[in-house]
Image: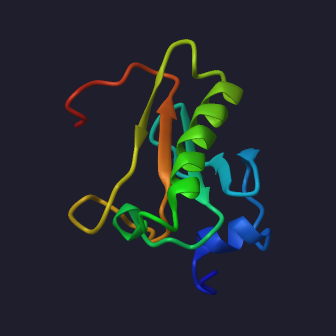
Amino acid sequence: MTTDCIFCKMATGTIQPDIVFQNEYVLAFRDIKPQAPQHILVIPREHIASLDSLETGKHKTIAGELLMGARQAARIAGLAENGYRTVINCGKDGGQEAYHLHMHILGGRPMHWPPG
């Protein structure tokens, strides 16, 4: 845990987000600045700065749990039937603003490609 990381504070319960799904590896909660009718973030409970910071041998379980947690959160939120988009921003040029690995789940409206 990093003491100044807001996502670490959520993962430990210091800050209480609007939780959609959680297990021992990940936490999924509603974004406070939604970019779609449904906007959920999925984070690992362990502090990992970005997707590029994942270590092959060490983080395989967390990487899998991140994907499966996103699937479960989307189902709980009622997004599975019509579909949803998942996004992981990585680094400054990738649009990452919070340096704790997180996946966005966006849904509740049609998504377009390329994103605008």
**Residue 74: % across, % down:** 60, 30
Picture layout, residue 114 above or below residue 29: above
Residue at x 48%, y 63% (from the top left corner): 101
Q: 30 or 48, which is in the foreground?
A: 48
Q: Quadrant of the C terminus?
A: top left
Q: 6 or 23, which is in the foreground?
A: 23
**Residue 113: % across, % down:** 23, 27
Q: Examine the rendering and report whether any part of residue 41 can be seen.
A: no
Q: Examine the rendering and report whether any part of residue 2 can be seen.
A: yes
Q: Quadrant of the N terminus?
A: bottom right
Q: Which residue occupies the extreme top position in the image? A: 81
Q: 68 or 60, which is in the foreground?
A: 60
Say whether residue 13 is left or right of residue 42. Answer: right
Q: Quadrant of residue 5?
A: bottom right
Residue at x 70%, y 66% (from the top left corner): 10
Residue at x 29%, y 59% (from the top left corner): 95
Residue at x 45%, y 68% (from the top left corner): 98
**Residue 31: % across, % down:** 58, 50
Picture layout, residue 113 above or below residue 1: above
**Residue 107: % across, % down:** 50, 28
